[in-house]
Amino acid sequence: HINDVFTSLKFGYPKLGHKFNAGKSEVLFFNWKHTLPAYMPLREMASIHQSFGFGTPPANRSLQGFPGSPGYQSSQSFYSQTPPGVAPYQHSLISPTDAQSSSTISHLPLARDSIDVAGRTIDKCILSDSSSAKLIDQLKITKEGCPTHSGLSPSDYPQAAQSCRMLLKQCGTMKRVPLPQELVEQFAHVETISSMGLLPQIGRAWLTIDSNIYLWNYRDGSDLAFYDGLSEAILSAGIAKPKPNVFQPQIEYLLVLATTVEIVLLGVTFSGDEIHVIPDPLFALPTDGAFILTIETSDSGRIFLGAKDGCLYEVTYTSDSGWFSRRCKKINHSRSAISFLLPSFINAAFYEDEPIMQIVIDESRRLLYTRSDKGTLVLFDLGENGSSVSRVAYMTLQNIADAAHNIVSTIDKTCFRPLAGISLIESSESPELNLVAFSTSGVRMYFTCLPFNAIIGAPLTSPVQRYSGLTLTHIRLPPGFSVSSTSQKPSNVRASYYCKGTSILSSPHADDTDSIWVASSDMFPFSQTLTEGFSVEQLDGRVCDIVLDGVRNSIVGGLKMEPPAVVVQHSRPPANFVILTSQGCHIFPKLRPVEVLRQILVESGGADSEIVRTFFTILKEEQGAAVALILACSQHAQDPQISDWATKAFLLYGGEIKTTPTNVVPTFPHSSLSGADSPLT
């Protein structure tokens, strides 16, 4: 949006406007975090992370004017020096600060109306950044309470001409980390490989061979560790934070292992980046015949187990035992206490086993979901303080398929079953929608746990309502279902993952290999409908697990909305996804508009190309200009050429300077994707 600020300032600040247009080396940079501007060289804006309030610029910087720096002045002290005859302007976002290095600025004969227009321009840009459509609005779920569907329109998944395919690419350079060589050598003696998975909380992958478990750093394949203190085959593994005041402070995590006969909690410590598993179990308790298939833990350290008998268990522990309680015990949250007093043949008549294959915990709402191998979804409420468990509702696969077919009756019901996986929708992305389920055909099904008529129009500051059921609200068909689509459809989906607008599916590609389908709306952040780009990447093995690298950081406040990636990409690194296959780990960054522009500039050898022009058309001029400035201000040693190309792109496609009446808030130029000559259809 700085381009629009220049447009407004040029005629009120002729000296600044002239200097920018002539030298192209200095810009007026605004620090939105501290609401302070600073006049600085274009290349020095590479510290945009610090100058947007995420840290203090280095001491050797020539830039002054930030809180705590020698040249810092508040708006109040600056405007006490305004020239005679010019009324002080009180706008909170415009306040020149670097009086030492740019003292002449404060004595320029500035027109108050021009400053007012510039201030309102910035206000409008900030408002525009925060006015992206809510997910529920993009899915067209209205007050009438009718579930909706999407994915059948060509505009839902725009197709790109061959020369512009890069604009819709979702995955950055794929880094392949093979299995540790020592682990490969163990395969010659394998009798039983139970399972393998990822532990993003500690950056480790795990694999069980018989009764042994191996852990290694999935980012580089280093630090291989193993534990061989069990006598039975390991079925599943998980990692948990220890509860406070129970263990010694050196215990950083608990490694939870489930075998055919017992559940074991082991202490985990770190020496730098090296992991150590304490060989003596902290706790061990019998499974009582329950085969544990999956383990999931909460941020508070609660340990939940999904079993083959269809029950949700929890392992609890305390520092001391009492007369009528043990230090560590297993609780069944799926069946009532009276069921344990009945003979097994009576229980079998009332309970049909549906092995639990997946557990998902929603920390922001304190909810828990399970998915069985037959597709039944069960909702549990963990209570307002997250310390209890109560079963709230369930929905069978038949119910889901029937409801989905009623929403979009033109699609065969087999496309909605069976289920490949479920993922939560964080409250920062959508306060109204809670869960997304994927079918093996790649269909996304969005659920809410609130009454359907209560999810529309409730203010975000309203008290949290406890959740009462599962309701299917939207069907999103994958690429390939549109009549005019030329792309293939995903099929036989084995694994799925969803995180903050990015969907990942894996499906078979060839013998013993999979492909992943990645879809995201990052290139269409302000579309009023859910518009997604997608790309397909081939892997070298079968997908076993998909996670976001590191720990999710939800927005503080729970109900505050997460802005689109294009708004915060200057201050946050890209999200990295990790995919574990039978051959190793694949790590790739999710491409955002800034990485897309960088790649197309490199591939095009400059800014004067049709694909760069199309990039600005898709994002609109003001957003495209802001993305170009991020690259133009880069200080990376390998980026001087890209910085020059991005500067040229900013000047070529960032919009023309226009005069604006002082009593009118400037409007932004908008381009359309439609048109016969558009490379996107």
Image: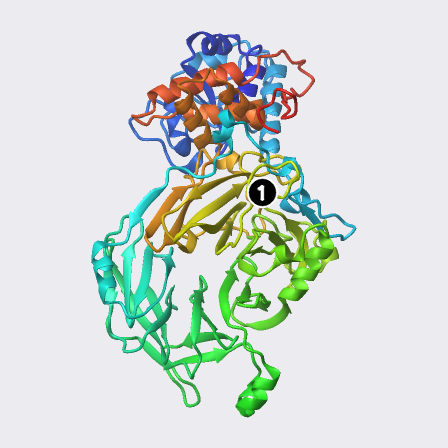
Q: Quadrant of residue 92?
A: top right
Q: How is the image coloured?
A: rainbow
Which residue occupies the foreground of this view, 173 or 107?
173
Q: Could you say where residue 387 lies in the image, as x and y percent from the top left? A: 51, 70
Q: Residues within 10 Å of mark 1 (few under 14, many from 20)?
A: many
For residue 95, say whether it is visible: no
Horizontal side of 349 relative to 570 (left or right) equals: right
Residue at the spot 44% in from the left edge and 47% down from the top edge: 515
The residue that label 1 is drawn on is 479
Image quarter where the C terminus lies is: top right
Q: Secondary structure at mark 1?
A: loop
Total numbered labels = 1
Q: Could you say where residue 451 lies in the image, as x and y percent from the top left? A: 71, 60
Q: Could you say where residue 522 lies in the image, as x and y percent from the top left? A: 53, 37
- Above/below status of 111 relative to 301: above
* Amino acid type, residue under disc 1 in the picture: Pro
